[in-house]
Image: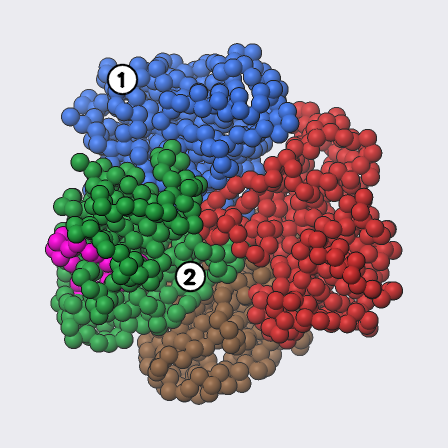
Chain colours: A brown, B red, C blue, D green
Amino acid sequence: MKISVGITGGAGYTAGELIRLLINHPNVKIEFVHSGSNAGNRITDIHEGLMGETDLVFVDSFDLESLNVLFLCSPHGDSRKFMETHVLPETLKIIDLSMDYRHKENAANFVYGLPELNKETIRKTQYLANPGCFATAIQLALLPLASKQLLKNEIHVNAITGSTGAGVKPEVTTHFSWRNNNISVYNVFKHQHLKEIRESLNQLQPNFDNEINFIPVRGNFSRGIFATLYTECDWNLEEIRRLYSDCYKDSAFTFISDNPIDLKQVVNTNKCLLHLEKHTGKLFIVSIIDNLLKGASGQAVQNFNLMFGLDEKTGLNLKSSGF
Amino acid sequence: MKISVGITGGAGYTAGELIRLLINHPNVKIEFVHSGSNAGNRITDIHEGLMGETDLVFVDSFDLESLNVLFLCSPHGDSRKFMETHVLPETLKIIDLSMDYRHKENAANFVYGLPELNKETIRKTQYLANPGCFATAIQLALLPLASKQLLKNEIHVNAITGSTGAGVKPEVTTHFSWRNNNISVYNVFKHQHLKEIRESLNQLQPNFDNEINFIPVRGNFSRGIFATLYTECDWNLEEIRRLYSDCYKDSAFTFISDNPIDLKQVVNTNKCLLHLEKHTGKLFIVSIIDNLLKGASGQAVQNFNLMFGLDEKTGLNLKSSGF
Amino acid sequence: MKISVGITGGAGYTAGELIRLLINHPNVKIEFVHSGSNAGNRITDIHEGLMGETDLVFVDSFDLESLNVLFLCSPHGDSRKFMETHVLPETLKIIDLSMDYRHKENAANFVYGLPELNKETIRKTQYLANPGCFATAIQLALLPLASKQLLKNEIHVNAITGSTGAGVKPEVTTHFSWRNNNISVYNVFKHQHLKEIRESLNQLQPNFDNEINFIPVRGNFSRGIFATLYTECDWNLEEIRRLYSDCYKDSAFTFISDNPIDLKQVVNTNKCLLHLEKHTGKLFIVSIIDNLLKGASGQAVQNFNLMFGLDEKTGLNLKSSGF
Amino acid sequence: MKISVGITGGAGYTAGELIRLLINHPNVKIEFVHSGSNAGNRITDIHEGLMGETDLVFVDSFDLESLNVLFLCSPHGDSRKFMETHVLPETLKIIDLSMDYRHKENAANFVYGLPELNKETIRKTQYLANPGCFATAIQLALLPLASKQLLKNEIHVNAITGSTGAGVKPEVTTHFSWRNNNISVYNVFKHQHLKEIRESLNQLQPNFDNEINFIPVRGNFSRGIFATLYTECDWNLEEIRRLYSDCYKDSAFTFISDNPIDLKQVVNTNKCLLHLEKHTGKLFIVSIIDNLLKGASGQAVQNFNLMFGLDEKTGLNLKSSGF
């Protein structure tokens, strides 16, 4: 028996990546992919790489009655509108990839879907808010410290993201002629993901209220987030490594690497890799994810697996690209 | 019951890609990965993206007795040396990724492993010579024509390859500072793959003896081959499309696209996509593959599946990268 | 005494490159840069790399009376409109970078501005049509043959262009997420530059009427055109090299290289480099230019120099980027 | 009268870039380019982009008697060896691009060649130590603060460099297949340039002894350094901007930009661009240079101009590449 899945916002990057994953998921039947602007077009006309794998066509209307789960891949703001204007079948599960329900103050009955933090509540929830990409990379680097109340000073974060983080709509900063071989920053010290990061840290370490100095950087590559972080920490490297290994020993996709790591080690996978160094009083952390997978659609599928009682890795044993 | 697999030349790119595939293959147990220079090192120290998936360590000796199949990923020339200096177990199958046994004149009992051409003999062979990357992209573009004796004039081929085609050993032309944003050609009109291409065409159309004007181009990307071809052809576009669709209707990975195609549609997959256009008397063909997958290790696994009676796509339902 | 220069279409790529050149040209004073959409903005807000070099601001009106020369950098079609709707000062020179006046049939009194072909008429003309980028690279590869009536068969051309060739307006095919690491083709066998190429060849070899099979390729880099060409040719390599060297012995920017060439050798310069090989009966040619310089604004300045009696290289001794 | 120039270490990147600059310098005659390994080869065989500009050939011996200045472009360590083993003509000036004489403790009679800091002593010195690339970008971001004793806390620096910073010798981390689309870090918190940075800051603010937390990042591009810095600062943004503008008002190549800046604005120029933001108590600075120009050979020519009484910008009015 397959799980019946629907997808809205079907022409965007996260929907495309979700389709690429679910097409090969053994327990899934994609019932529809909704896109107002592309209704009638083949999925393969819009999403690269699906040729020969699907005959699906975008639709502009859908029936939720027979559906088991709906993935909301619409732009930020549209998910809340959707929830407020639809009467949903009682058992329908919702996985929202936008930021609409991530913050506690207006999360309604949505659970924040970071499995490394909330696995048990994720298993039981009907509604799930999938974390942001930067937020995922940064939280996974810091949660073990928060779990031991070790965050005592400012945190310094620099994270470089691939262009797919900026979405499918063309902008000056995603024009190839501009972005090729170029580097720039944006939203320095005030990126919108800081709020969900802080909420998760406070869930484990309620008294943490120091600055998180976060510099988001636009990189000249398509996929991935490469984050470096440091903060003061009394523990020695061995203790810290043990702490991190312990925290993530049951994680399906988060690993600690003794060796230095580089971005391509996670590209096209759902993994997060962490590398730890101690420099006198400071703990230095590298955290890397694929922004479209562990940072978006891959984590959404991971949450889907948990919500439906499947093995967490189902459909997510992805071949890394290597190059 | 898993199939016991060994790999030689384990530190190279094709071995790395093969490991990334076989790690997730449901019917495979990797018994050893041999590398003289890396013996004792972890696989994950050398091959990107395998962290968390394997604890394998490179070995410098191995036992072939209990093995079902050996993949030879050593440099060109070493496979023949290996075959000539080892007494092999009677039932051991060999899949050779080098060019040593591709040409009929010295193929010994190796079968040329292009499934679209030789599927039945591949199923039955013990020894298999895996095709070259350019050779695969170019043959798949031309074989349907040869099957109808339609090759009647010169063939014009330009094919751009990613840097991984040049192997792991650093050279001037694979230095990032040089290759980034750069384009160049090499072995113009005399690339070593021309011989296996011609042999396959002659297998279907023995009288073909016209020139194949082949310009190999070094591209500034890591993965993939983008080949354009044209030749004179009397048939109209509809007839040609029908011919190609018919030829590849049972192919697991080769598809005809009505829409124009771009390289990234096949990157990180085992697919070959073909696009056909007719311009007055000329048939124009675009053929794209991932040089490390359909052009090397993916096709090797496809051949492995055939040789062991498995479904041809086992372990090869790869998520396309999209970006 | 400086030459007074005006520029229309000032926000586009060719205008930007022209300004970058003219800012350092010892004989030029830029009187105005016109842009309807950017009037009032600083030049440096739009065109990268000019910070600290100019305080110019875009204007939306201008006076042609005191001007010596006007560069038309507007989109194709707008130049003809401009010429037809303005009464121009009698001595005002016009250099048009669009394709509006390139073809003989509607060139009016514009001279086709390829210095290697028309240097003497360029020196004397008041109105000049600047050649297309592909057209420049391809003509320079073939003109010596045409000058000796050596074009006797089909010509095969494949040319890869950087993304700046597609202009500043964002399109699907210039979105970084799509184009990065990607290759594709467009306008196969029917690119709009074929007409001006054929006209120039016929100027030297009137009887040439064979096919020019031209495949334009979109490359994943910003700048440059890398063209490969071949055609049948009886002459031996030494004779051909002598012919080319002779043809271009007085050229300021076109050189023959004995060694193989790669695209970055001309990037950020006004040069065209040619490399010649003979393969049995075929002459193989590589021709490389920077599409924004020799393929557009650099050649426009070269023509400007000729039209005003300056040394052809004035302001064009550009440091090559190397990397 | 031209100044007679010699270059050692002629096959490396900094020598190549130096030649590209000096070829067009109106006051320079290159007497020789020394390279042991390339003696007899043409300069154009090794250094991209010089075709048609020079017939120079590498030499393996040279005469210093008639020389006015020698640029040492040899690897770190070789300059000191050279100075210790040669008797130099009394008036010969030396410009050393290695790190051998940058640090005060063993600078001998070399002056540290950052014109924004030491212009007057540079004018008068015979021997000059050219600064490091990271060191240049970071110092120019911080010197105005040090000049007012405003550095009172830790400084946080993240700087991404192009691959040319790693030199011509191929390494794992400069293999195109590895570096393309990849990001990584190295020498975190202990990069060798920290020492010269601190010495310059202390020259202006002797009491500064806080940490400089510096994370060097390997970028997937060839040219440029993009540095972000922040530190606590009481002054408001207007005051700080006035301070910076004032400090650099006589600088030929260092400019303050009100608008956000991106790396390509300085690529292929000798400029440093700075952008300043204030976020509550923190001053945030972006500093960008071309690592081979302002970070190496361009600054060497700037110093050369100063040492010979030429206008500082002679030969350095370079066309920015823009793309």
The local secondary structure at tag 2 comes to strand
Between B112 and A285, the one nearer to me in the picture: B112
Classify residue A188 as left or right of residue B107. left
Between C11 and A288, the one nearer to me in the picture: A288
State how many labels appear.
2
The local secondary structure at tag 1 comes to loop
Above or below, C194 relative to B311: above
Between C191 and A50, the one nearer to me in the picture: C191
Q: CA distance from mark 2 to mark 1?
A: 56 Å
Residue A289 in view here: yes
Instruction: Read off the residue under disc 2.
Output: D218
Image coords of residue D30 (percent x, y)? 28, 41
Residue D136, magenta (yes or no): yes
Classify residue C16 as left or right of residue A117. left
Image coords of residue B69 (percent x, y)? 79, 64
Image coords of residue B184 (percent x, y)? 52, 41
The part of the chain drawn in magenta is D118-145
Hey, which quadrant is residue C37 in on the image? top left
Instruction: Read off the residue under disc 1.
Output: C87
Residue type pointed to by label 1: Val
The tag on residue D50 is none
Classify residue C9 as left or right of residue B181. left
